[in-house]
Amino acid sequence: MMTLNRRQTLGLLGAAAAAPLASPAIAMGTKLKVGALRFTSHAASFVAFERGYFTEEGLDVEFEFFQAAQPMAVAIASGDADYAVTAISGGLISLAEKGAAKVIGGALSEEPGIDGQKILASNAAHEAGLTSPAALDGKKFGVTQAGSSFHYMGSKIAAAEGATVEFVPLQKVGAVIGALKSGQIDAWSIVPHIAKPLAGSGEVQMIGSVADYLPNYQVTTVFTSTANASEDRGKTEAFLRAFSRGADDFNAALVDNTAGDAAAENMVRLIHGYVYTDREYEKAKPAIVNGAMRINKGASLNMASVTDQIDWFKSEGLVKAEVTAEMLVDPSYVEVMS
């Protein structure tokens, strides 16, 4: 089994081989670092932590927060984080091809009937005619990095509209927001808890929905190191059980609205401990509520969407042509939907 240090991981270099070890039983208080973004879409992990689901599984969880997907993939492969939830990126696929990381489940999904990710335009671009994705030709589209989920979404949207766009990498979500507000870029796509407040403030304009171009898109996945997936099944299953309980609570409270008003209020307050912490609760609440999208039950994985993403990365030359879904995904942990 391969283990990469941070320097090797960043360079996507080869790793030294090590003999596999037997997986011990989970001891109470097993320490884990879980990678996350301060997004509503990461709520399943926050709920599992705050409601003691990780603790009940014997896991002592500490969060490590990131500002983009690719650095999180690096942290998983290098051992700086144990499990994480984020979008599939070129970096994650390349690390999986190197034998360092595995997707073990699904998280956020676009779903018919649920208001999902939005396509935004800067005010300047909107005034100049970018009032729908059909007018994207020749525009600048913001991304964190080349090979990010933003790159994938923007490319698929542009292709559907027959548009040629310039992708502008800005490294962090906050930098993309700033560039869109100032008109340095023309367009972007992002989860609704960020998109809707930005548009509602009048600082940017909402011009479309990602689901119109990518229905049933598997937006984020649960992933870990190949070592955890193949050698420490008990710990990995324990993490997924707790995570799935958190997702169930979140979906019932804010997506399906079946848990009642009190449960919804409690859920929003819980999430506010991690998301929009710089805002007063009453100001943060609408963004959190309006940003609720489905987190897959039981961490099930939409393999058709994952395969489409891999094929796009290969077509763009962002990952090796010989990469396969089997290199990226360990399908033995959750229900895999084709």
Image: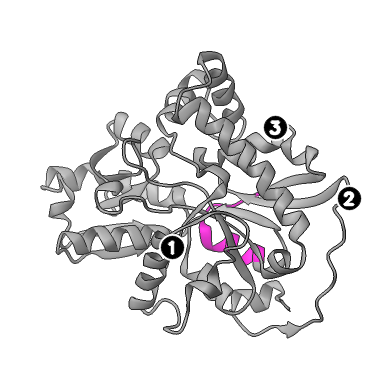
Residue 260 location, x and y as percent? Answer: 51, 16
Residue receiving disc 1: 306
Residue 52 location, x and y as percent? Answer: 75, 33
Numbered badge on residue 257: none
Residue receiving disc 3: 50
Mark-to-mark CA distance, 3 and 1 = 30 Å
Q: Which residue corresponds to the image point at 10% horizontal and 47% vertical from the top-left?
A: 129
Q: Is residue 229 above or below residue 195?
A: below
Q: Nearer the viewer, residue 331 or 77?
A: 331
Residue 120 location, x and y as percent? Answer: 27, 45
Residue 114 location, x and y as percent? Answer: 35, 36
Q: Nearer the viewer, residue 273 or 98?
A: 98
**Side of 317 where 83 appears, left or right:** right
Residue receiving disc 2: 27
Mark-to-mark CA distance, 1 and 2 = 34 Å
Q: Work out whether mark 3 precedes mark 2 in sequence or the reverse, and give the earlier one.
A: 2
Q: Is residue 7 above or below residue 231?
A: below
Which segment is the magenta one? 64-76
Q: Which residue corresponds to the image point at 46% horizontal and 23% vertical from the top-left?
A: 257
